[in-house]
Every structure is written in C-alpha cells, then in structure tokens.
Image: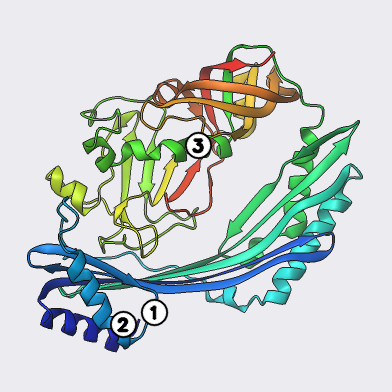
Amino acid sequence: MDADFKQKLFDRASAAGFSDCEIYYRRGRTFESHVFKGEVSDYKNSGFEGLAFRGTYKSKMGYAYTERMSVDVIDEVISNAAANAGIIDDPDAGLCRETGEYPANAYNEALNDIDQERKIETALAMERAALAYDPRIKSVPYCVVGTAEDEVKIANTYGLELAHKRNFALAYVYPQAEANGKTKLSGELWHGARWEDFSPEALAAKAAGRSLSYLNAEPVKSGRYKILLSNETAAGLLKVYSGVFFAEAVQKGFSLLKDKLGEAMASPVLNIRDDAVCGKSLGCIPFDAEGVAAQNKAVVENGVLKTYLYNLKSAAKDNALSTGNGFRNGIHGAITTACTNFYIVPSNKENTDMLASLGDGLYITELSGLHSGTNAVSGDFSLSASGFQISDAKIKRPVEQITIAGNFFGLLRDTADVGADLRFGMPSRMGTIGAPSVLINGLEVSGL
C-alpha cells in the first residue's frame, strides 16, 4: 500500500460523506516443501495482499475489504462501506488516536537469502537423518521445511501511521517407528527467525528418539495421579482456555472470571503474562490491529488475577484502557480479542528437578482432542493422553490409551510447581502461546 493509494482512498471517502477513516493493510508470503521417500511430495509458494477499510458514515461505522490493490477499486470499497454502515447493532469504539511510543520492529533480512533449493535440500537431509537414526525407523510420513513473512500497515485520518513486518522459518518431522508388530508416530517442531540456529540432523534425531520412546506403550490403572505436564501439553491447554481471560468473553458471560479481578484464582506459584515483546517468541509485535501500542502485562501474578485482555470496544464498555489485544483474523474478520505472547512464567527448575518433585506419577507429553474434549466456558476437559509412568523420579515405561479429566480452573489452583523449560508454539490467530512444564497435584486418569 503506497502513500498515493492511501491518500486517494481517504480523500474520496471524505467526499462521499465519511468522517474518521482507517485502512488496515496486510501482505504475506509462505513457502513449504514437503518431502517423502527422497522426493518433493508437495510444494507451496503463495502470497496474499489486501486491505480492510472502515469509517464513520452517517454516525455509523461502515466496513469493507478488498484483495485488489489498485485505485480503480477505491469507489467500490467506499460504496460497500457506506452500504454496510449501521448493519451491526453493537456500536464500534472508534479509531485509535495514539501517537505514543511503539516498540521497535523485528525482521531478519538475512532469512530472505535462503533460496528455495536450499530449503528443499534441507528437508531431504532431515528425512535422511531420521531414517538413518535407527533401523526401527521405517518411514517419515511428514517432513516439512518452510518460511513465512507477514507485513501490516495501519493508517487513519487522525494521523496514525504504523507499519511492521516479521518473518520466520519452520521445520517439522514425524518419523514412524516399528517393532514387534507395533508402530508409533511422533515428531518435533522447530521455528525461529535465524536459519543458522536450525539443525535438520538434530531435529530429526530428537523426533526419531521420541517415536522410539513410545514403542511398547500400555495403559495404566485408572485412578488419581500426580501429573507433570510437558511444556507442549501445558501450552496446549493454556491455548484452549486463553479466551476466558478476554474482557469480551467476561462481558458476554462466557467466562467464569467475571468479578474476579484482584482475587486469587490460581496457585501462588503461578504467573501468567501477555507480553507483546518477548525475546523467546516469534509472535512479537509493536502494535495491535487497532493501532494500540504493544504492552507487556501481568495477567495472573502469584495466583491473583490482575487484568483482563482488552481491545478498544471491550475497554470502553468497562471504562478501561485497551491492553493492546485487538486483532483481526485476516482482512475479512472483525476486530475481536487475541493474545500477543501469552505464557506461564518459568522458574529456574530443570526437568530433573520437576521429575524429582513428581516422584511417582505420570509425565504427560501428548494430548489429543483439545477441541472436542474441552469446554471453554466451564473449564471441564476430558482428553486422550500419552506419555510416561514415573517411579522414584525416573521413567519406568511409556503410557498410552489413557484419558485425563479435570477442570482448567481447578488445575490452575492445584498447580504445585512450574519448570524452567518455557517453550512457545507457532503464531496463530489466537496469538502465540507458551508454557514450561507444569506439576499438578492430581488429576483423574482413566486407563485399565
């Protein structure tokens, strides 16, 4: 989006009767190379570009969007926004007027120098390394290397003019292990902004070792067990229930955290933050989709709920300030709430310390059914799980075909400790979610 296009859109909108106006522009590109049996099995190299326009027309907010970035679509965009003005009964909070300090943008130009041939060869090398790791690794059904780039610009008639872009690389590999008539498939994911930090051989070895570790897994007897959630599984649960911390969910009666600000709602060892700028995550941003400056804030501090996450509209309803959590799901979606980098704050306790604290119990490393087996309002969950039985702080055997059941809010209150191994997932429409390993005093387990 160039300055000429922006000015022509604003000028024609004003002439058509719009007062305050905003342009939200987004452009991106993704590349993925899937390999299987030494050949490229799938190849994606795609881009997108478009903008969302909104403005006040006859005292109502009108919305429109386009994926064509040429001046000949401007009149159509304005006409559509005028026609849509007032259709939505819920009043808009208006446009951002901030002109304060915004965090610096993070973008790695060197990542653009990695050509497609090198990415494909890296994926092939990762597959070869996984197959060579152990003769019990028979195939690698999923082996992918890719890159992604995203750019956002926001401008409005109050003089706001913002831009940021980010890029990253990703790789994942899932080797299949076979022995004694049994097969196991597991894997590992890497993502980062620095190509030189990535080792396809190391990732393949870790993934292959993980698949092998689950061979000969069996259920355990049903009962109540002390549980250590791995960083991945803890982050998965936190992601599913992150919406209960959104002010709009509280206002609509979809969160049990209503009227809980300032109250203890979790174990005192638990701290949860939403930090727009966080060095361990790829989800860092200088501003949200409304142009509000990024913020780092404590959501839960020593078990006490400190704040909800607000966009401009939900903040206006509570006579509060936006926390910089207003986001869109692409240019087509309305502004709602999402996290930035939402995570459980780690301690300094390593995995061996956490296993020692567990003593006897279950170390849960994989969960399935995170959408079908969870209730985002009540907090109840019942999830298929696998991992390892722990005895005397050491791994006894792999475990599968079990179900763990409980309640998210109860789990927060029953947290005994957190580890040092903070790990973030990939950026998504919900934000970027992270967690260390989390020790729970007890959960119900269904098995034998």
Quadrant of the rendered structure where residue 446 is? top right
Q: Is residue 443 left or right of residue 361?
A: left
Q: Nearer the viewer, residue 400 or 115?
A: 400
At 39% across and 25% down in the image, what residue appears? Answer: 409
Q: Nearer the viewer, residue 435 or 250?
A: 250
Where is mark 1, residue-wise?
68
How is the model colour-coded? Answer: rainbow
Q: Amino acid at mark 3?
A: His
Q: Amino acid at mark 2?
A: Val
Relative height, residue 439 to residue 9 (above, below): above
SS under mark 3? loop
At 57% across and 22% down in the image, what residue appears? Answer: 404
* Nearer mark to the viewer, of 2 and 3: 2
Q: Are marks 1 and 2 in contact (CB under 8 Å)?
A: yes
Specify whether residue 325 is in view: no
Q: Is residue 336 left or right of residue 392?
A: left
Report the disc number at residue 73. 2
Where is mark 3, residue-wise?
371
x and y percentages locating residue 98 in the rendered image: 18, 65
SS under mark 1? loop
SS under mark 2? helix
